[in-house]
Image: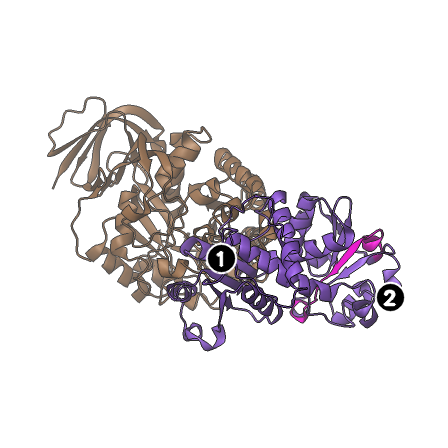
Chain colours: A brown, B purple
Amino acid sequence: MNNILIKNGRVIDPSQGLDEICDVYIANGVVREIGKNVKRKATTEIDATGLIIAPGLIDMHTHLREPGREDEETIYTGTRAAAAGGFTSVCCMANTRPVCDSRTGIKYILSRALETGVVNVFPVAAITVGQNGEEITEFGDLISAGAVAFSDDGNPVMNAEVMRRALEYTSMFDVPILDHCEDLNLSNVGVMHEGFIQSLLGLEGVPAAAETIQVGRDIELLEFFGGRLHICHVSASGSIHLLRRAKKRGVRVTCEVTPHHLTLTDELVKKTNFDTNAKVKPPLTSEEDRQELIRGLQDGTIDVIATDHAPHTDKDKDMVFMDAPFGLIGLETAVPIIFTELVHKRFITMSQMIEKMSVNPARILKIERGTLKAGAVADVTILDPNRRYTIRADKFFSRSRNTPFDGKKCRGAVDTTIVGGRIIFSKGKILEEKGG
Amino acid sequence: MDRGKNMKFQHKHLLGLEELTREEIELILENTAGFKEIFTRSIKKVPTLRGKTVVSLFYENSTRTRTSFEIAAKRLSADVINFNVSTSSVVKGESLLDTVHTIESLGADFIVMRHSCPGAPQLLARKCRASIINAGDGPHEHPTQGLLDAFTIKEKKGGFAGLNVVIVGDITHSRVARSNIWALSKLGAHITIAGPSTLLPKPFERLGVRLCSNLREAIRDADVINLLRIQIERQRANLFPSIREYSLLYGLSEERLKWAKKDVLIMHPGPINRGVEISQSVADGKHSVILEQVTNGVAVRMAVLYLLSGGEENE
């Protein structure tokens, strides 16, 4: 097996409070040593001068679409997109076809990941059978098969009693419920954030209350009945207020935000003349909401940045706004966007970025990742904070192209992605050869 | 004919009135007056668009607007094709873009489109070479209706400065309201929108529009009242309890008309629900210009087709 010596990089590892110029030595897939002037023999040496060495990034909200919609994405293409985006691990959501609600589903994903994937795939299982919101799945069996969390993402659990039981029942396993908060009666046929822009365009609106009502409901359920709750893709300032207050009184709730909600607003729908790449759930919110999301990121209310990578074909997105599916892809744009819009503009530090894209997801999911401590699995992401990089959708490794960031000029990019001690991605190329 | 004082219209498409300047709207209105003059001639046809093809593509039912565009195009000597969505391959699942590319390959110079989704004409404009004219995209815009309403007001009132225009009805779901608001506010009128609070978009206050849910207050000092058709589907969505209650609160009767100015104009984009938003006698009364709106619609659409074609004579 390869031994890798990464020399002279700025190691930022918030899991051990480290931020120093160091060398990192990797042998047999494990981090062996971090320090100054490490003298080790290595088959591969990487000069990381001017670069950041971070624990491998983890995207805890990815749609890989396999099985069922392999025309949109597969584990083969999606994990390559992840590697190119600096992610060494992804959590794939359960809204596949069929829904991942059984041991068979989990095992299928894990075996496909082994055959075709290039990064770690941690499957998320459905909360309810078929994501129908009615009967809970076999959590115990699913966890033993490899599920790391439960989510009906895309199909929120509308029945509070069902959510109560799910939280109560999972409390004995201490796994999180990844909660897509949306009151379907309120969001109804809405396709964009309800507000000024929406009222000008005459599109049906989704009021912010569609999200905040369920955030509030599920925080209440958590306090009464236990379990662990992680709120997916928060978008409304009202949700941040609820979460901030809950955390202050010690409730075990965590949450994530997407790069697009941190950087785009409902203005985009108008500015792009109804481009369907601006259609996403939850919808892009107002500038005031966006400012509150950034504050939430800064004060720790928001634990995680996750992409909600949601691939759709051109055929499906080339429709009128009402008919096009919700969602956009994010694996290959997250790092350059976060660097450009948040780190270089001094809203968050690089250490906060890595904390929210690696350390915290690992902690919430209880997976042994997100650290470069000696003995840890050698999942490492090397970032170039100053590289000029233009996002080009036609160059994506993902099978889909649905991004609102196409053509955007960025500063900051992924240099190298190492998974389990193997260099998977370096300088724009996927190095691992595995069949599709 | 006075064809707009040498100013050229710079747009290839007419998608909405929000993106037009006051001067551009005035240019269209001036040209409209010129085309309306043709209606008094014995031969109501000019050769302006000879050799051009206008295709109308309506994904929603419409008799008036479609017929109005058809007559306008024919009076300009264009060839007019009505692409019938309900009997075409669209019902076999052909996508909007495939349909439009087919129409374009058949040689369309103009596509007049109506669709239930806001932004549908914008999608076409991005992907097509033909000039796109929006004949209504969901609740978003209906630019030729806004223009014909402005033209009618100008004809009757002489101008817009200081004029109080009240639009009554389901503003939230009305493309007519939006296009009227853009045109009339640019031209200098004061606009009030009136109706149940569930059907008045509150953010419109940011456009300088007054919101009012009390009809009497809304139409006091009104120079123009534009009544919109109320749709039964909205009752099913709980936006108001019943057509009966709507009519009780907002139906315009002869009695209530007295709350407005003596020379108030009554407008309606049609089709009207007699006895719901407007009483029989008001619809047919001396204040009503509803049928003149229809006539003006043809002249406005001629002006729009003419200006979009580059504003040059084809002789």
Where residue B112 sits: x, y (%)? Answer: 51, 62
Along the horizontal axis of the image, is A187 left or right of A385?
right
Q: Crowding at label 1, few (<14), some or many (≥20) Cα neighbours within 10 Å?
A: few
Q: Position of residue B125 (x, y in %)?
A: 46, 54
Q: Nearer the viewer, residue A46 or B118?
A: B118
Q: Residue B151 is drawn in which quadrant?
A: bottom right
Q: Which of marks 2 and 1 is nearer the N terminus?
A: 2
- Residue A423, position as x, y percentages in the image: 19, 41
Which element carries disc 1, helix, strand or loop?
A: loop
- The answer to whether residue B245 is visible is yes
Badge count:
2
Q: Mark 2 points at which residue?
A: B254
Circle 1 residue: B315
Up/down of B229 relative to A59, above or below? below
**Chain letter of the residue beneath label 2 in the structure image:** B
- Taking the spot 30% from the left edge, 47% from the top edge, the residue there is A89
- Nearer the camera: disc 2 or disc 1: 1
**Residue under mark 1: which chain is it in?**
B
